[in-house]
Amino acid sequence: MTNYILSLDQGTTSSRAILFDAAGKPIRSAQEEFTQHFPKPGWVEHDPMDIWRTQRDTARAVIEGQGISTAEVANEIAAISITNQRETTLIWERGTGEPIYNAIVWQCRRTAPMCDQIRAAGFDAAIRAKTGLVTDAYFSGTKVAWLLDHVPGARASAEAGELAFGTVDTWLLWKLSGGALHITDVTNASRTMLYNIYEGDWDDEILAYFNIPRSLLPEVKPSSMVYGETVAHIFGEPIPLAGVAGDQQAATFGQVCLSPGMAKNTYGTGSFLLMNTGTAGVPSENGLLTTIAWQLENQPLIYALEGSVFVAGAAVQWLRDGLQIIDSAPEVETLARRVDDAEGVYMVPAFVGLGAPHWDAYARGTLVGMTRGTTRAHIARATLNAIALQSKDVLDVMARDSGIALSALRVDGGAAANDLLMQIQADVLGVPVQRPAVTETTALGSAYLAGLAVGFWPDTATLAEQWSIERTFEPQMSDAARDDLVAGWQRAVERAKGWANG
């Protein structure tokens, strides 16, 4: 019996590796940040080799730190899973494995004008009907088209079948397998704006519109199955590669939101709310996304409604790195607790536009309501309020689309450790917020998917039994205070909208 699943959690600002045992508990982890590149205003890039190097090195660090020798790797680790920042787009040469350009990150807004043209032409309706997505620079499709149009020789090479496109999971699977695997899973495919989530295939009409050759694209697989194995030299012995899901779908699975109506919120760089809608994709009338939640091997697709908030934890990073009013992210809670409320100060962290339910690529960050009495503590409190209020905007429309009233919200991600933020979230929602004992649910979810594929866990009922609550935050704010806070927030959001568009 092998002892662990090794989960690779490749995020927007860092790569992590976590070993999970059969109880679903994290045993050892390693993390390494990597450089963010901002070549122009609104552009965000990563060096693909930084992504690979940091992910490989953290995996090795976890294995070595646990005292697993290279000869013991195959006996100790049942499988490797991958969860990843979604929509980030890479293209590389099939022959050499060399990237043709930096990875274009999900946050990047360079293709916003292209999206404007798509909407003006009316093709956004076809994209919405087939992919469940709104037409926005957030997704991979326009990024692929941009790379083919702007990297010298790329289009000719792509049409000759010499290039490979992938999201981050595909890139890592390629590298881990020594180029043997060019695949993605249904969750990551569903975020490209190129995949028909109802027919389960790349969509020829959309590919033709973007002039993207099908030969560029990876094969799409279920989220839970054995895809192949690592080449021996990376970890000493081959290890099965067995579970893949985009980070937010992985977190939903890790929170064991297995029944329709169950919802979770992950507080990372952005904030991502998903509600399980079962085997039916529910179209949104309110700016949410219909997406694939996961697919187990030989099982039907499971769908979700999703609301994506672009900036959550990144707003706290801005307080640290931009304003420099805190030295570390956890300090924001201590600073914000110095005041009882933000005293009319609102921060709208639309640094890269607004996501659901507004979808305004031209909104920009706004700080309003300040007086001479405003302190950095008020700004810190306003930042935490903003993270919670953005999530409320999404959950309100999610309830309208699904017809399901939320009874509780399961939370995870780095900022879920902030007790004040979780209390504010419960207050503005008016429902309990449940923080699980294991908050590494993104990595855990992909580990669960891999473990099911190799028999490390027998079934999903076993996973549900393992999930437990560490703390529940009950709403404490009065209805009147909540209404006032929300009304001020809505006014602030209106002032942020359209700012970069004159």
Image (cartoon, rainbow, N blue to C red):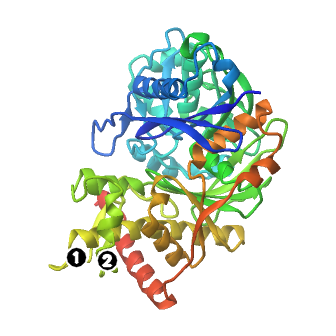
Q: Horizontally, is 487 left or right of 170 in the view? A: left
Quadrant of residue 415 within the rendered picture: bottom left
**Mark 1 element type:** loop
Q: Is residue 219 visible?
A: yes
Q: Residue furthest front?
A: 67
Could you say where residue 398 lies in the image, as x and y percent from the top left?
63, 67
Q: Is residue 180 above or below residue 343?
A: above
**Picture residue at 56% right of the left edge, 52% below the top:** 439
Q: Amino acid at mark 2?
A: Ala
Quadrant for the N terminus, please. top right
Report the label total: 2
Residue 370 got which mark?
Answer: 1
Q: Nearer the viewer, residue 390 or 436?
A: 436
Among the two numbered marks 2 and 1 on one chain, the one whose residue lies closer to the N terminus: 2
Quadrant for the C terminus, please. bottom left
Q: Nearer the viewer, residue 50 or 477?
A: 477
Q: Nearer the viewer, residue 154 or 178?
A: 178
Q: Is residue 289 above or below residue 460?
A: below
Could you say where residue 124 lies in the image, as x and y percent from the top left?
57, 50
What residue does disc 2 label?
Answer: 342
Instruction: Give the crowd class for mark 1: few <14, some 14-19, many >=20 residues within 10 Å.
Output: some
Q: Amino acid at mark 1?
A: Met
